[in-house]
Image (tube, rainbow, N blue to C red):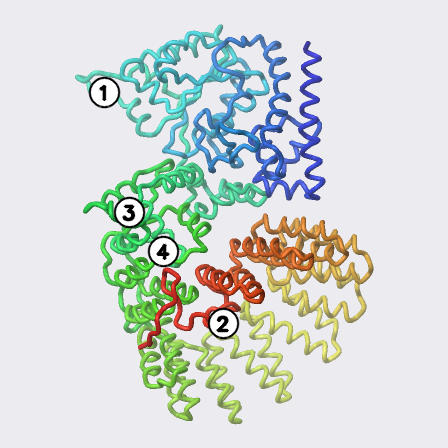
């Protein structure tokens, strides 16, 4: 019978791996790519496919099935068949009684043991009911895990042990216990979680039945040890279990919040009762504290797991990398989403207004008065009619309720006061007015809003409330920009004026620029001067240009000098250019020297140009060398390259190469490209390729892609297409997002459209903000060439959902060309709601020259002021 069980287990496991492997091969993914898609570590995925590897966990199988679009339930059933036989065999060997307390550890789902879900449930494919599958993020081991591992090792060696993990809500206590007992699963241990009819009653009734090789799971141990009626008796029973050798080995694991641990350990006063004496004795020497936050080392490990494809950790790190409260973020996210979906209408309206405010650039501390007024138009007419006089107070109280990890959807907060000296250039900067009580949106909901609401334009109440209540210049300026891109031009106009009135120099300069363009030179000058008075010295440069254009050279010079006196070094450069243009080279060099003395490398570069053009090669070299030594990331590489070019021009190729190598040693990657060019032109293709490889190793975001591209082109020019693709695959493994796109283009050019489409879809699934829209556009073009216009339009919509709002305008033009003017107009309006891209702006203004109202209807003619 035992042999039959083993054969059954082997067949089920082999079939599970065959199905996974066949689909992986069909999609032509590497295991690294699959790990990224499934949100798992590469080691976990690799072990799942190894014939000699362990049976993959339920979470791993579910994640792989979802990523590969396979039937989740069928694969989970195969997995259950694969573990059934060895579990029975281990039970027989160990003498465990199937009728004993609990069940084998391998048969437990960690979420049934109260490990907090870290993501919303995924629906199980092919099922008609029951809970969905939830993935666990990768686990980062910390110092407390070593203590738990030691307790487990001692239990395996035959000693009974107890550890109670103490920590605040959602600090990873229960997950740490779950990870700790995994070695016991392979030893055939059982786990008993007493909870029915109540935790305390279940524990008290059956603790005497606990057998050897059992984990007693006391999550939220206050429900056991703190029970008024049974707590002391449970503590006594646990003590008896631990000190009775013939009942062991057993492992008792519990979790507690710090306030309960303190309460149970506190000594009573002499004349007071002692309600926790047995509990205090039991806990002595058996508690273990979990820190509130991940330290730098743990965060680095989490980041490494994220880089390997753990999407849950990657997502959480975008919010928690600074404060380190990673487990709290993971635990709170699903609860916050549940709170959003189940909120009362007024509370939901406040959350939606807050999400819109944050995604459109309002600072985190949101004034309650603003949100309360903004929320009104987020309610339906029926919901609005149901409002009571205290609706806002009740809604804020509802949203302030904490969930796991001590997070609230919308919590009351107080901004920290600024404690810094005001720079001397901010001569008349105004302070934002007091805005009353403020609240802060949970980070997870903020991120959720950016993703799910990107296609929506806020209603009229939002813009009105912003104009009425917001006072911070940056908030007002950001909303001005967002209103403008959404063609809400009238609101953009009003918000721009309010931003300027509250000290936004950007808004002042924009008003000045618009006035200058309209011919209102007096108004423009007033606005430029006001911006300068608020600390923007560059406004004086703009005003000087305006004077210069009007022929007032003396006035322009005075303004340039005033700007320079206020630290605007670009003013010196502009003055110097004007002097050079009029032939005053000595005056120009004096001004360039002043700019250089203020740390402006451009001054040295410009002087060097002048010397070089005047034939003073030695003086030019000296100045280029000074600019190179300043190590300015913008100008130093250029200076190095100029020095090398001058050496090269003089025939000193060895000296030119030495300079470029010196520049690279100073951390500037661009000279490597110049050095590679020299090797290529000299015919040293081997040296050229070696330098390109060196450039790729530096992972510079500008030059590494160029180097990869040139390496690929070398292979292609040699006719080695297979080698070219191998280089691109290596680039993809270095997280170069353009590499997969390049492979797809190669496949497309070779006529292998099926493979090209598969690769483009992988890029889309990776959701890279730059390349996902590009890949979708390529897929659309393939659909259009094949005559599948409906499929093309579907993909354009998907591109828009990935942030490529211009895709909607493309569909609109397609509809317009086909004569469907109504459909085209609808799509143009959607493009505006997304935030129109530059290439769609002309189409939108053509349709609606005065803009749109917040509800999408055309704005009536109006005049700016």
Q: What residue would you read off at disc 1?
A: 268
Give the residue at x 45% y 29%.
Answer: 115
Q: CA distance from mark 3 to mark 4?
A: 24 Å
Q: Nearer the viewer, residue 632 or 72?
A: 72
Label of residue 382 in the image = 3
* Location of residue 781 with respect to 1 vertically, above or below: below
Residue contact at pointers 3 and 4, CB within 8 angstroms: no
Q: If you read the primary sequence from the N terminus, does the residue marked by circle 2 or circle 3 appear first? A: 3
Q: If you read the primary sequence from the N terminus, does the residue marked by circle 2 or circle 1 appear first? A: 1
Quadrant of the rendered image containing residue 662: bottom right
Residue contact at pointers 4 and 1, CB within 8 angstroms: no
Q: If you read the primary sequence from the N terminus, does the residue marked by circle 4 or circle 1 appear first? A: 1
Q: If you read the primary sequence from the N terminus, does the residue marked by circle 3 or circle 4 appear first? A: 4
Q: What residue would you read off at disc 4?
A: 357
Residue contact at pointers 2 and 3, CB within 8 angstroms: no
Q: Nearer the viewer, residue 194 or 638?
A: 194
Task: Single out the residue that lies furthest toward the right.
Answer: 719
């Amino acid at each position: 019978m035992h042999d039959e069980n083993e054969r059954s287990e082997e067949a089920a496991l082999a079939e599970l791996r065959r199905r996974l492997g066949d689909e992986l091969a069909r999609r032509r993914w590497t295991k690294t790519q699959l790990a990224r898609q499934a949100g798992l570590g590469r080691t976990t995925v690799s072990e799942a496919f190894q014939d000699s590897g362990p049976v993959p966990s339920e979470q791993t199988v579910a994640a792989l099935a979802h990523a590969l679009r396979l039937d989740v339930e069928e694969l989970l059933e195969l997995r259950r068949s694969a573990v059934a036989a060895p579990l029975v065999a281990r039970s027989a060997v160990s003498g465990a009684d199937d009728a004993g307390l609990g069940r084998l550890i391998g048969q437990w789902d960690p979420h049934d043991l109260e490990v907090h879900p870290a993501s919303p449930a995924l629906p199980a494919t092919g099922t008609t009911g029951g809970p969905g599958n939830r993935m666990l993020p990768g686990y980062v081991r910390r110092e407390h895990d070593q203590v738990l591992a030691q307790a487990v090792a001692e239990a395996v060696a035959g000693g009974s042990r107890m550890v109670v993990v103490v920590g605040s809500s959602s600090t990873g206590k229960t997950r740490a216990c779950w990870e700790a007992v995994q070695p016991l699963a392979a030893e055939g241990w059982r786990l008993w979680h007493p909870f029915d009819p109540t935790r305390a009653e279940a524990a008290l009734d059956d603790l005497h039945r606990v057998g050897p090789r059992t984990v007693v799971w006391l999550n939220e141990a206050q429900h056991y040890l703190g029970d008024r009626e049974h707590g002391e008796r449970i503590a006594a029973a646990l003590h008896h279990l631990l000190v009775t050798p013939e009942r062991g080995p057993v492992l008792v694991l519990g979790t507690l919040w710090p306030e309960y641990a303190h309460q149970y350990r506190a000594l009573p006063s002499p004349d007071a009762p002692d309600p926790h004496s047995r509990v205090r004795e039991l806990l002595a020497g058996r508690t273990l504290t979990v820190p509130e936050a991940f330290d730098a080392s743990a965060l680095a490990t989490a980041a490494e797991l994220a880089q390997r494809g753990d999407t849950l950790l990657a997502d959480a790190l975008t919010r928690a990398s600074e404060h380190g409260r990673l487990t709290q973020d993971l635990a709170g996210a699903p609860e916050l989403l549940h709170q959003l979906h189940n909120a009362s209408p007024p509370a939901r309206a406040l959350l939606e207004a807050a999400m819109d405010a944050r995604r459109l650039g309002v600072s985190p501390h949101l004034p309650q008065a603003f949100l309360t007024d903004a929320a009104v138009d987020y309610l339906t007419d029926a919901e609005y009619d149901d409002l009571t006089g205290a609706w806002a107070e009740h809604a804020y109280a509802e949203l302030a309720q904490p969930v796991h990890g001590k997070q609230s959807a919308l919590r009351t907060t107080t901004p920290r006061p600024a404690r810094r000296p005001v720079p001397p250039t901010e001569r008349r900067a105004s302070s934002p007015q007091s805005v009353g009580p403020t609240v802060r949106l949970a980070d997870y909901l903020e991120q959720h809003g950016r993703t799910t609401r990107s296609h929506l334009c806020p209603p009229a109440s939002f813009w009105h409330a912003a104009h009425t209540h917001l006072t911070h210049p940056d908030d007002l300026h950001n909303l001005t920009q967002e209103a403008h891109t959404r063609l809400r031009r009238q609101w953009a106009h009003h918000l721009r004026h309010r931003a300027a009135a509250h000290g936004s120099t950007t808004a002042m300069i924009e008003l000045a620029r618009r006035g200058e363009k309209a011919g209102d030179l007096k108004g423009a000058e007033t606005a430029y001067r006001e911006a300068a008075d608020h600390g923007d010295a560059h406004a004086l440069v703009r005003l000087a240009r305006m004077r210069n254009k009007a022929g007032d050279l003396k006035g322009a010079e005075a303004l340039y000098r005033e700007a320079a006196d206020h630290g605007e070094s670009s003013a010196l450069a502009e003055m110097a250019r004007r002097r050079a243009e009029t032939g005053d080279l000595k005056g120009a060099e004096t001004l360039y020297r002043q700019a250089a003395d203020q740390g402006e490398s451009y001054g040295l570069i410009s002087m060097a140009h002048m010397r070089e053009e005047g034939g003073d090669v030695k003086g030019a070299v000296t100045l280029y060398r000074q600019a190179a030594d300043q190590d300015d990331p913008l100008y130093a590489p250029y200076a190095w390259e100029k020095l090398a070019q001058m050496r090269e021009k003089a025939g000193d190729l060895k000296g030119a190469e030495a300079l470029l190598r010196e520049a690279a040693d100073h951390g500037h990657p661009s000279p490597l490209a110049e050095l590679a060019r020299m090797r290529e032109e000299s015919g040293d293709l081997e040296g050229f390729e070696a330098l390109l490889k060196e450039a790729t190793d530096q992972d510079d975001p500008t030059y590494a892609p160029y180097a990869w591209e040139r390496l690929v082109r070398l292979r292609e020019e040699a006719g080695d297409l297979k080698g070219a693709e191998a280089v691109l695959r290596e680039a993809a493994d270095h997280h170069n997002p353009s590499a997969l796109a390049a492979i797809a283009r190669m496949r497309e050019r070779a006529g292998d459209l099926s493979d090209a489409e598969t690769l483009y879809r992988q890029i889309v699934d990776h959701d890279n903000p730059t390349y996902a829209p590009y890949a979708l556009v390529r897929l659309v073009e393939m659909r259009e060439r094949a005559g599948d216009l409906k499929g093309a339009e579907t993909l354009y919509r998907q591109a828009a959902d990935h942030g490529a709002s211009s895709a909607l305008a493309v569909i609109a033009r397609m509809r317009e060309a086909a004569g469907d003017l109504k459909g085209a107009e609808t799509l143009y309006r959607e493009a505006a709601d997304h935030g129109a891209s530059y290439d769609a702006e002309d189409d939108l203004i053509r349709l609606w020259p005065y803009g749109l109202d917040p509800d999408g209807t055309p704005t009536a003619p109006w005049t700016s002021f």
